[in-house]
Image (cartoon, rainbow, N blue to C red):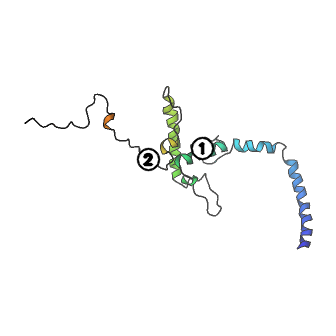
Amino acid sequence: MNRLLRCCVPVLCAGLVPVLSVNAQTAPATAPAAAPAAQNAAPGFKNLKVLPDTITRDDLRKRMRQFTGDLGVQCEFCHAPADPVTKRADRASDANPVKETARYMIQMTEDINAKYLAQIQNREDTNPVTCGTCHRGEKHPSVFIPPPRQEGSRRPGAPSAVAPPATAPPA
């Protein structure tokens, strides 16, 4: 074994030297500095139907984290589960039907913000509508049921909800 290593290591090193020197000569001097910016600037994501094509990797991750927090779910709620063989998730896959519903809901919130809320003059609350506005950390938003009105909270001058007690005629 020792003899085999003593023979193979020099041969291996001699074979790697020309390969490494060719790569060093062809690589541009600014490649390491430009790589992170280029990687983040034009990621070329596949299958973005409602999100802008120009979205950066960091912005996409931020939006996805916001969705998971707003709905209180994990990525697999909308995205197809990971391949059992490769253990890698295919985020571009449309195998999960919930993803199409999510796209519809994303478009709905964008429409509410752009078409309706933008037209309200002198809005006191300028926060945009997000998934969390309705979902509040739940997969399916609960139906709002207003609390029952109490007797003391009726409008002034409005008739009482309860009829006055009947008085007995004098005998």
Q: Which structural element holds mark 2?
A: loop
Three-letter amino acid code at disc 2? Ser
Left or right: residue 80 compared with residue 159: right
Residue that numbered label 1 is attached to = 63
Identify the residue at horizontal 90%, vertical 61% (top origin).
13
Q: Which structural element holds mark 1?
A: helix
Residue neighbourhood size for the residue with mark 1, other residues' Cα within 10 Å, grouped as few (<14), some (14–19), many (≥20)? few
Residue neighbourhood size for the residue with mark 2, other residues' Cα within 10 Å, grouped as few (<14), some (14–19), many (≥20)? few
Q: Is residue 48 visible?
A: no
Q: Position of residue 52 (x, y in %)?
A: 61, 40
Displayed quadrant of residue 53: top right
The foreground one among 103 and 157 is 157
Q: Position of residue 118 (x, y in %)?
A: 51, 30
The foreground one among 53 and 171 is 171
Left or right: residue 115 compared with residue 33: left
Left or right: residue 162 compared with residue 139: left
When the figure is inspected, residue 145 is found, relative to residue 2, above or below; the finding is above
Three-letter amino acid code at disc 1? Arg
The foreground one among 76 and 55 is 76
The quadrant the C terminus occupies is top left
The quadrant the N terminus occupies is bottom right
Q: Is residue 167 visible?
A: yes
Residue that numbered label 2 is attached to = 142
